[in-house]
Amino acid sequence: MDAIRKCQLMVVAVAVLAAPFATALAQPVAAMPAMMPVESVLTRVPAECVGFVAVRSLANMGAKIDQFIADIGMQAMMPGNLLGMIKAQLMMTNGINDNGGLAVIMLDPEKFGCDLQALMGMSPTTQPATPSGPLPIAFLIPGRPGEIFANYNPVEEQGCFKVDLPGGGSPAFAKALGSYTVVSPVLAVVDAVVSSTRPVIVPPGHADLFAKCEVACHVDMQKLAPIVAVLFDQIERQMKQQAQSEFTPPPVKAMMSVYGALLPMYKDSITQLQAITIGLRLAKTGIVIEEVASYLPDSTFGQLAAAKKFIPGPLLSKLPDLPYVLALGVAEEAPLDAAAMALKKKTETEILDAVLNSEALAKVSVETKDRLKKIMETWSDECTGAQVCIGGSTPGNGLFGVSLVLRAKNAKTLTDTCGELAQIKDELIKALFAENGSDAPSITYTASVGQVAGADVGVFELSHPELDALDEGDRAEMAKVLGEDKIRFYVAAVDPRTVVITFGGSQAFLAEAINATRTGKPIDNYPSVMEAMKELPANPILLMVFSPANLLAVVKGGVATIAGPEILQSHPWPMLNIQTQTPIAIGVALKGSAVHETVFVPTALVAEGVRTVMMVMQPPMPPAEEEDEEDDESWEDDEAD
């Protein structure tokens, strides 16, 4: 309990930082008196910190939150602006200067006797558990310590204020630092922040987020990497223990073996990161979450990112829309120079070798592994871009369809490998399901099953003894979902540089997907999609859109197909009521060795979701009471008497 009480002060910052996500809603109240301007909170964050969360301006953030609350129709829930109400609840109404920012800082845990493994319950089981010191967390709050904590009866001694927080436990300590107050449950942490002579230096790409976001979190990955490495080592040990346990099912053992083989490489990629910043801002049309992840320029991933060049063009222009639910496009990549290509192949080979040499695939022959590596190298060299669509299917041909459009240097080179690829995958599956013997699924490939929409078509087919044993009724139900009673992936070389692969919807959906590549169905030119893209990075190399409205339309159609259309009339379907066409969108851009990712969620969609939830939670109205005519007549008779 004492540790919990020590963290009481975290409520001050966390409550303010969490304000954009709070369900408490408010009406505007009278403005507070004008306050003195203060310096940027970033000038008071020490360079020695591992990471921090910062609010650029409390006043600006409060205004944006109030506007957002009004936009989603929830302003009538509370009688005051949200930021003012939080300050009043914390009894700090007059002490905090809204013109300033706010920051939560974490210093190096090791220097302050903090064992993150112990705090997370991940200490090695072979050693006795050792107690850990608290996290070295400090808060920067705009204002003077004596005024901020005036209602807590602070005790001052030589410029340090000791504050007893509600609930008892150890006190917190506070000292002035410029226009801010540094607060922490650990006095040594307060002293370290106050005595620091260097402010944090945020890399340029990351600093841009702080300039435009209401709140942002920044982590110096080079300082955090040793801590993360220790945690990864512990996770790896735990995965090995579970994989060796007799109680772990064979398929789970196989997955753990593969993931365990990739874990060291993932850990290595983390050590190559320079910094990560995640920011949140409230735009006029929606919520925007942005992330910048920069790699060390001389690292493997940093060099690869800097070397990649992409050909500008629409990213969602060759996909069927029946309607689309999720559409994703990756820009076509220009050829790499010789050095970058060698580095790319080396990296891909290391990843593939790690998987193929895992214990789960120990029974696969060396010859098969070499054949697979050769095919994977061919696909990596040939594929230069891709577009994917998951959505509805053509009427009467299943519930959904998945279309993958590959841009290739030579489409025939890819399709020519499909037969061998099916044989290799079949062997891999049998190796993973070795303990189940003949019950393992199998994959076959037929190079030619005729033409669809003028293109030659091949097909991968997945079979299993249980699928072969399905009766006529089960096959009919399966056809309602997939469009046919087989699990098939169709492959077609549409032109010398385009390959289409589809799943679901049978050959009718394949024909739709092929025609879309020729005539062009530019989803990224839809007004609703363009509206979402306004908040994404310019010239993205990856674009993804997800339409909840279209998803619900597909679900409704599926329910009507499976259970009959009358079910849509006999149920209100309150959750299937979203009309907002603007999708949730994700865009990724590259700039040098930094990756910039943005997620956009439209305000109109949030408003519809809030209204739907409120409607569902609203208790049903009681039936109206029928008027008792006999009683009324008796009353009139009594009055007459």
Image (tube, rainbow, N blue to C red):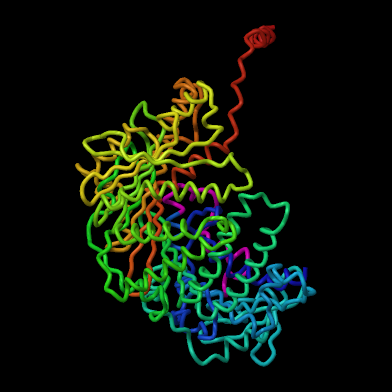
**Quarter of the rendering containing residue 16:** bottom right
Reply yes or no: does residue 397 show up in magenta: no
Q: Residue furthest right?
A: 128
Closest to the observer, 239 or 291: 239
Q: In what quadrant of the picture does the N terminus appear?
A: bottom right
**Quarter of the rendering containing residue 258:** bottom right
Question: Left or right: where does residue 149 sit relative to residue 326?
Answer: right
For image coordinates 51% across by 92% down, the residue present is 197
For image coordinates 59% across by 60% down, the residue present is 359
Q: Where is residue 622 in the image (x, y as percent from the top left)?
A: 61, 26
Q: Where is residue 177 in the image (x, y as percent from the top left)?
A: 55, 86
Q: In what quadrant of the picture does the C terminus appear?
A: top right
Relative to residue 310, is residue 513 depicted above or below?
A: above
Q: Where is residue 336 in the image (x, y as percent from the top left)?
A: 28, 70
* Residue 582 seen by the camera: no
**Quarter of the rendering containing residue 128:** bottom right
* Total residue callouts: 0
Relative to residue 386, is residue 449 depicted above or below?
A: above
Reply yes or no: does residue 87 show up in magenta: yes
Closest to the observer, 456 or 148: 456
* Residue 27 seen by the camera: yes
Q: Position of residue 65 (x, y in %)?
A: 46, 59
User: Which range is magenta?
Assistant: 69-95
Question: Left or right: where does residue 287 sit relative to residue 147?
Answer: left
For image coordinates 44% across by 67% down, the residue present is 279
Closest to the observer, 8 or 561: 561
Question: Left or right: where does residue 194 sit relative to residue 503?
Answer: right
Closest to the observer, 20 or 526: 526
Relative to residue 231, is residue 162 depicted above or below?
A: below
Question: Left or right: where does residue 335 sit relative to residue 544?
Answer: left
For image coordinates 39% across by 61% down, the residue present is 598
Relative to residue 475, is residue 26 depicted above or below?
A: below
